[in-house]
Image (tube, rainbow, N blue to C red):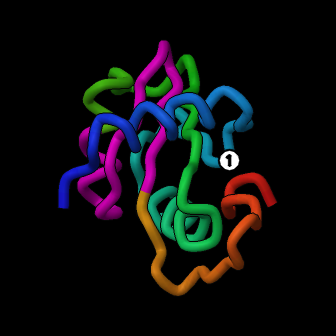
Amino acid sequence: MTMSAKMRAALRAECNQLQATVHVGKDGITSALVQSLEDALRTRELVKVALNRTANVTAKAAAAKIAESVGAEVIQTIGKTVTLYRQNPEIEGKKGDPPPWRR
């Protein structure tokens, strides 16, 4: 399912408030990193990933590879920071509750 432009824009606006939850180090995209990102996406849905200056991969390439490995969508890539989104239907909230990434 592809995301609408309106939804993507709303998520991009939310990205400004987020701190990086997952960090890619010099070893690049490892199985431990993928597992950490899986956990973060399961609980928060919207996750910011920071690439270390010594990471041996560009942000755009890393974004595509990481998103594919966890089944998420790339919301934006700015500098060495990538924001990913994957909806979790198991997260239930009442109307008026803040989204999971703000909790």
Residue at position x 40%, y 43% from top? 7
Residue 64 occupies quadrant:
top left
Above or below for 92 versus 101: below
Residue nearest the viewer, comparing 42 with 27 = 42
Q: Is residue 69 rendered magenta in the image?
A: yes
Q: Quadrant of the C terminus?
A: bottom right
Q: Quadrant of the N terminus?
A: bottom left
86 horizontally vs 62: left or right: right
Residue at position x 73%, y 32% from top? 17
Q: Residue furthest front?
A: 95
Give the percent coordinates (x, y) of residue 23. 61, 41
Above or below for 48 versus 94: above
Give the percent coordinates (x, y) of residue 89. 46, 81
Q: Residue furthest right?
A: 103
To which residue does mark 1 refer?
Answer: 21
Above or below for 93 versus 65: below
Q: Residue furthest bottom?
A: 90
Residue at position x 35%, y 40% from top? 74
Q: Residue furthest left?
A: 1
